[in-house]
């Protein structure tokens, strides 16, 4: 399975520094714009400590932008794989129906089926992020997160609208993330048996 690989740096800044940094980025790249969006992410729990994380994600509450995400970190490098899902597929998964994922042509789904069977993964907490993202020079991405909320309630998932919000970011603070993609030569990809797989077009969608 072919992963997108990247370095990631995070920091928390105040509103004033956020305004200055955003203005500077826009001045440096006047043809670029920030994309504003909301992403809901639900993490699966039950795996061993240090094991890859799996998430269900929905962007802007849009049923056409539902994703499964697998992510892990190794030797300072992040590895990420995303695949689109339909709402029907997602709801099946949330209800515990995963048989349809067995031997799926989308390798991420088949991988999740295997890991869920071995480690008894189940839907865990949902977190909501309000973000602004812009692609920068040299395969880099800058993301500002102005609001991070953990959804509390007896039963919450990425389709839940009624939940108790618990703020995870201090007032007047902004979370800034910089990601820089690592690109490998085709020869190396072939040696890793990933040369025939298409690149992950959704890795930086959110």
Image (tube, helix red, strand yellow):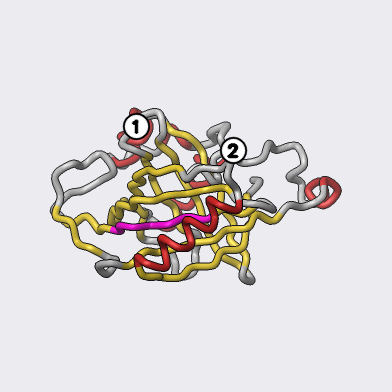
**SS category of the residue bearing label 1:** loop
Say which quadrant the N terminus sits in: top right
User: Residue 9 location, x and y as percent?
Assistant: 54, 67
Front position in the image: 181 or 114: 181
Residue bearing mark 2? 201
User: Residue 176 location, x and y as percent?
Assistant: 45, 63
Which span of residues is magenta-colored?
A: 142-148
Residue bearing mark 1? 62
Is residue 108 rendered to the left or right of residue 183?
left
Is residue 14 rendered to the left or right of residue 160?
right
- Number of marks drawn: 2
Task: Determine which quarter of the picture holds residue 89.
Answer: top left
**What residue is shown at x 17% (from left), y 49% (from top)?**
155
User: Residue 60 location, x and y as percent?
Assistant: 34, 38
Q: Is residue 49 above or below residue 41?
A: below
Cα–Cα gap, marks 1 and 2: 18 Å
Is residue 199 rendered to the left or right of residue 107?
right
């Amino acid at each position: 399975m072919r992963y997108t690989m990247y370095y990631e740096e995070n920091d928390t800044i105040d509103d004033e520094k956020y305004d200055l940094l955003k203005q500077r980025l826009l001045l440096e790249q006047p043809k670029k714009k920030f994309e504003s969006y909301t992403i809901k992410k639900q993490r699966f729990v039950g795996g061993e400590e240090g094991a890859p994380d799996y998430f269900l994600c929905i962007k802007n509450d849009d049923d056409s932008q539902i994703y499964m995400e697998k992510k892990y970190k190794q030797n300072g490098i992040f590895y990420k794989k995303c695949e689109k899902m339909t709402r029907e597929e997602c709801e099946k998964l949330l209800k515990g129906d995963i048989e349809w994922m067995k031997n799926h042509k989308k390798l991420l789904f088949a991988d999740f089926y295997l890991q869920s069977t071995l480690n008894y993964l189940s839907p865990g907490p949902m977190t909501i992020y309000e973000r602004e993202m812009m692609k920068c020079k040299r395969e880099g991405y800058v993301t500002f997160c102005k609001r991070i909320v953990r959804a509390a309630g007896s039963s919450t998932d990425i389709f839940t609208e009624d939940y108790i919000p618990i703020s995870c970011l201090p007032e007047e603070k902004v979370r800034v993330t910089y990601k820089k993609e690592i690109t490998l030569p085709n020869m190396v990809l072939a040696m890793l048996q990933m040369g025939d797989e298409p690149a992950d077009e959704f890795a930086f969608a959110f």
